[in-house]
Amino acid sequence: MSTPITRYLDLNDMRRLVDTVGLRPMLVAVVEALREDYARWTEFEKCPRTANHHPLGVLELMPTSDQELFSFKFVNGHPKNPALGLCTVMAFGALAKMDTGWPVLLSEMTILTAIRTAATSVLAAQSMARPDSKVMAMIGNGAQSEFQLIAFNEFLGIDTFRLYDVDPLATQKLLRNLSHDRALTLVPCASTAEAVCGADIVTTCTADKAYATILTDAMVQPGMHINGIGGDCPGKTELEASILKRARVVVEFEPQSRIEGEIQQMPANFPVIELWEVLTGKVNGRASAEEVTVFDSVGFSLEDFSALRVVNRLAEEHNIGTPLNLMPLMPDVKDVYGLIQPAAVVS
């Protein structure tokens, strides 16, 4: 039996991994893993994430497992953090073997969450958006926005993006980061209404922890696909409720989405479809070219599981990361007390 290790990926390791693999190929790998894992939905232990709330934000734990691997993510959401020089969303996560409990990976997940969120968005949109979609509105140009634009260009061929954020500096940041990409036509707009005019797909990704109405029913045209990824905790929404009433609504995990998603505005019997049903062909993601579709995405632990197992494989292939002396390996595995003796040498 080989000596087990725990691989540790810090922020610089993740940056190096993305640079080595390439962002677009990494998105492809995560989308493929997501498709595989959602196809075996019944094999996973599932529960709504545990959330501890504070007036300024929320801290959450997101666990899941199949019979081989267990994963969890720690993630926060603090909209006022940028004023303190901190990210609104920060995360780390772990992957462990189910048969022994040994943690094989401890990883940063701030970058990885942005990648897996974009991958999940396009995975849903492939089944829900109209195939002829060419224009997307990006409402909220913060930390997630570049990843969303690149993913929608890579997987759906979207080439024109209409941009709006209440903070003009956020839009300037997005333009600075992606204006060199000739595959993307970037159009800054003065309002949400201007940005969504003529859009086939609308992605909303704002940060305020409030019952907000970012997108009104009057802005939504027949055939639009709405990728709602900003409503992700109790008391936080982005879509006017009347949009949901006339749309086909797909969620990741209904018990969690009832608490945190856009559908928290709706009665308990409001009908929704889970994403795995669409991806396995059990239910269509769209009934007609005129239908309005909504992916009410709050982020689910299975997506972190998929992303972590991809990162673990790629980090091993490219020899990125550091062996971490996190768990004891010792001659007498019952002598934990011996580890604290002066002569103890821990492998």
Image (cartoon, grey):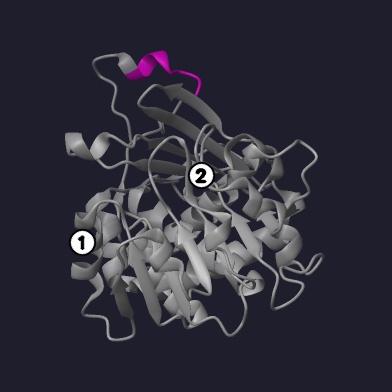
Q: Is residue 117 left or right of residue 340?
A: right
Question: Would you name the residue on which mark 2 appears?
Answer: 231
Question: Would you name the residue on which mark 1 appears?
Answer: 173
Q: What is the x, y in percent for residue 144?
A: 37, 57
Q: Is residue 200 left or right of residue 128?
A: left
Residue shown at 72% from the left, 68% from the top? 285
Q: Is residue 40 above or below residue 213?
A: below
Of residues 151 and 219, the one drawn nearer to the viewer in this rendering: 219
Q: What is the x, y in percent for residue 232?
A: 51, 42
Question: Tag 1, which secondary structure?
Answer: helix
Q: Residues within 10 Å of mark 2 (few under 14, many from 20)?
A: many
Residue shown at 65% from the left, 50% from the top? 242
Q: Which residues are magenta?
A: 333-339
Q: Is residue 270 left or right of residue 143?
A: right
CB within 8 Å, label 1 to label 2: no
Question: Tag 2, which secondary structure?
Answer: loop
Residue shown at 50% from the left, 33% from the top? 61
Check disc 2 and give the amino acid type.
Gly
Q: What is the x, y in percent for residue 116?
A: 47, 58
Residue shown at 47% from the left, 83% from the top? 157
Task: Reply yes or no: does residue 335 show up in magenta.
Answer: yes
Q: Does any portion of residue 256 appear in the rendered image?
A: no
Q: Is residue 118 left or right of residue 255?
A: left
Q: Does any portion of residue 48 appear in the rendered image?
A: yes
Of residues 134 and 84, the one drawn nearer to the viewer in this rendering: 134
Q: Earlier in the sequence, mark 1 or mark 2?
A: 1
Q: Residues within 10 Å of mark 1 (few under 14, many from 20)?
A: some
Of residues 176 and 169, the one drawn nearer to the viewer in this rendering: 169
| Residue 136: mark in rendering | none
